[in-house]
Image: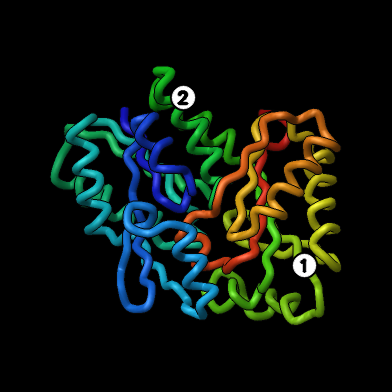
Amino acid sequence: MKLLVDSCSDISLDFAKEHQLFFIPLTINVDGKEYLDKYEISSEEVSKAVDDGIRPLTSQANPDELYNYFNEALKEDSTIIYLSFSSQLSGTYQSANIARDMILEERDDVDITVIDSLSASYGYGLLVERAAKYVNDGLSKEEVIKNIERDKAHIRHLFTVSDLDYLAKGGRLSKGQAFLGSLLNIRPLLHVEDGKLVPIEKYRGVKRVLKRMVELMKEEGAATEVHITHADNLKDAEALKNLILKETDLTNVQISSIGPTIISHTGNGTIALFYFTEGV
């Protein structure tokens, strides 16, 4: 069984290689030139483009591209599972279903499952980490799918951005929801609900919003792995990690950069916190 994931999971290429994952990059256009996410462009390069006033554009994987990726993976195993970026934030999931159906019309000797993660960035990444373990532990396809669906119900995304208008202009948030971005020194707290980005609270200053993230984590009983990502904002990411270590008994708190595709839609300054709620 082969597990396929895409670059919006924000996992590293080293992790994908180590766990024998099939990694599908999305495409990023920066100033008229196209790059494959992570393979040809880094988070740092996208952040610099944003600082220079260039707005990177992204392209979902289309059905023909996914058809080719699936066929490449099927050379390694006749059973594949593709855990995709949230269908509410990209059309990649729909493209994957079309590609799967194209292959199944041609072949009856393969088994292809497409799962909507309803997640983004390292919320999606945490699901990938667990799914990779299930596959490498030798669980059956049915057990892997069951566990992924269970984990999906408990994954939590909390994040704050410097400019909500950046999300709105990229089509990831409505202009009405982006009204918070115009308020002086207001940092919004957002989460992912049913795969969609939703503002839930607002605070004056970044310290207060980071504190609230930790409060929510404690209220929800986070007791396992925790991951923080940032877009050119390591200082606040480390501040959040230190706050978690101080206020909770959690010790497995990792920090990484938000991936190139996600930065293209959040802009710089973003801080995101991902964990599993009580129960998994």
The residue nearer to you, when weighing 186 against 174, is 186
Q: Which residue is mark 2?
A: 134
Where is residue 151 drawn, in percent x and y? 58, 35
Residue at point 67% right, 65% down? 161
Q: Residue furthest top?
A: 138
How far apart marks 1 and 2 lie (CA) works out to 38 Å
Where is residue 185 drawn, in percent x and y? 81, 74
Up/down of 204 relative to 73, above or below: below
Up/down of 247 relative to 237, above or below: above
Q: Which residue is mark 1?
A: 187
Q: Nearer the viewer, mark 1 or mark 2?
A: 1
Asked where in the image residue 150 lies, by quadrant, the reply is top right
- Circle 2: residue type: Tyr
Side of 189 where 99 appears, left or right: left
Side of 118 where 94 appears, left or right: left
Residue 164 appears in the figure: yes
Q: The N terminus lies in which quarter of the figure?
A: top left
Q: Secondary structure at mark 1?
A: strand
Disc 2 crowd, CA 10 A, few/some/many (<14, 14-19, 20+): some
Say which mark, if any, is on residue 45. Answer: none
